[in-house]
Image (tube, rainbow, N blue to C red):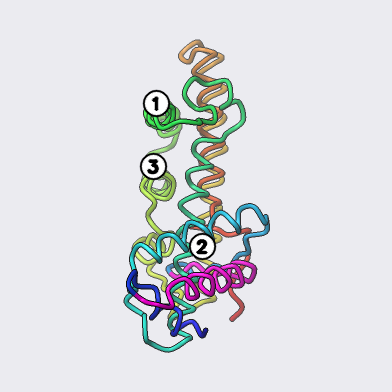
């Protein structure tokens, strides 16, 4: 079946639904093995691990079956492929962010963040994860207050802007392209070269701020304003910033879409 045909035969009462479902899984698997592009930032990446590809294909296939007919059912094969590719990208990004938040070094020692095997365990784990994220944000805010206080007045606006951007990327899942368009006035669809330059410039600012946050954490531990357990939790929070900010949603393996 072509992509257009298979999407048109996925309704529950269609006599060819089973055949179309098999074709859907095969097509999704084929798409997942190639290069995928995040639509908002136009960053390209590959899902390199086979287990991750299989997982995202299964998740998207189930979603398509549940939501059929899709808006692109019956349209051109190209439109259908692009729609399914975007679904794969979104599912992969969501899973990446979930792992980046919940699977950090030392997480296996935190109650409620171990692998769960039942619905009750999953509920408990979700509550613990929310508490963990809230604690991380509180500690990061304390470190940022320390960084900001040490800055000269003329540099504070830039530091505050970088901190707002990082929070939006990591905790609010705002697309990086949206941030660049708003704060830098660049659009990847209009000027790809300027978009890349602005992206690299902003990420350099973020890197400097992460370094400053780590230095603030060390200073707070040294002067007693931060306990050792909180310092360890803050260190994990800083790892969270790096991993989430370098997810496929914002900066995919440092690779650009060819011009």
Please say if the residues under marks 2 and 1 sit with CB atoms less than 8 Å apart: no
Q: Position of residue 52 (x, y in %)?
A: 61, 53
Position of the C terminus, as image quadrant, is bottom right
Q: Position of residue 71 (x, y in %)?
A: 32, 76
Circle 3 or circle 1, nearest the eye: 1
Q: Earlier in the sequence, mark 3 or mark 1?
A: 1
In the foreground, 113 or 67: 67
The crowding category of the residue bearing disc 1, from other C-alpha atoms within 10 Å (few below 14, some 14 to 19, many at least 20), is some
Q: Is residue 132 visible?
A: no
Residue on which the image places disc 3: 156
The crowding category of the residue bearing disc 2, from other C-alpha atoms within 10 Å (few below 14, some 14 to 19, many at least 20), is many
**SS type, badge 2:** helix
Q: Position of residue 17 (x, y in %)?
A: 42, 73
Residue on which the image places disc 1: 124
Image point (49%, 55%), residue name: 93
Among all residues in the image, which is located at the extreme bottom?
76
């Amino acid at each position: 079946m072509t992509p257009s045909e298979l999407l048109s035969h996925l309704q529950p009462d269609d006599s060819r639904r089973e055949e179309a479902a098999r074709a859907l899984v095969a097509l999704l698997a084929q798409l997942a093995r190639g290069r995928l592009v995040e639509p908002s930032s136009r960053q390209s990446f590959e899902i390199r691990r086979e287990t991750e590809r299989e997982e995202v294909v299964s998740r998207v296939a189930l979603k398509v079956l549940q939501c059929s007919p899709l808006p692109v059912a019956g349209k051109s094969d190209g439109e259908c492929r692009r729609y399914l590719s975007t679904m794969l990208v979104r599912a992969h990004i969501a899973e990446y962010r979930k792992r980046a938040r919940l699977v950090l070094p030392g997480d296996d020692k935190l109650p409620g963040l171990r692998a769960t095997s039942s619905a009750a365990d999953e509920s408990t784990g979700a509550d613990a994860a929310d508490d963990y994220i809230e604690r991380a944000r509180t500690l990061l805010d304390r470190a940022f207050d320390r960084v900001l206080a040490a800055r000269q007045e003329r540099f504070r606006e830039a530091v505050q802007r970088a901190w707002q951007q990082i929070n939006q990327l990591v905790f609010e899942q705002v697309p990086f392209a949206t941030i660049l368009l708003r704060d830098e006035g660049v659009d990847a669809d209009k000027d790809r070269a300027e978009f890349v330059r602005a992206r690299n410039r902003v990420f350099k600012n973020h890197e400097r701020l992460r370094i400053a946050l780590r230095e603030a954490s060390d200073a707070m531990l040294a002067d007693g304003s931060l306990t050792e357990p909180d310092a360890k939790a803050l260190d994990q929070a800083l790892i969270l910033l790096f991993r989430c900010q370098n997810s496929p949603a914002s900066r995919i393996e440092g690779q650009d879409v060819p011009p």
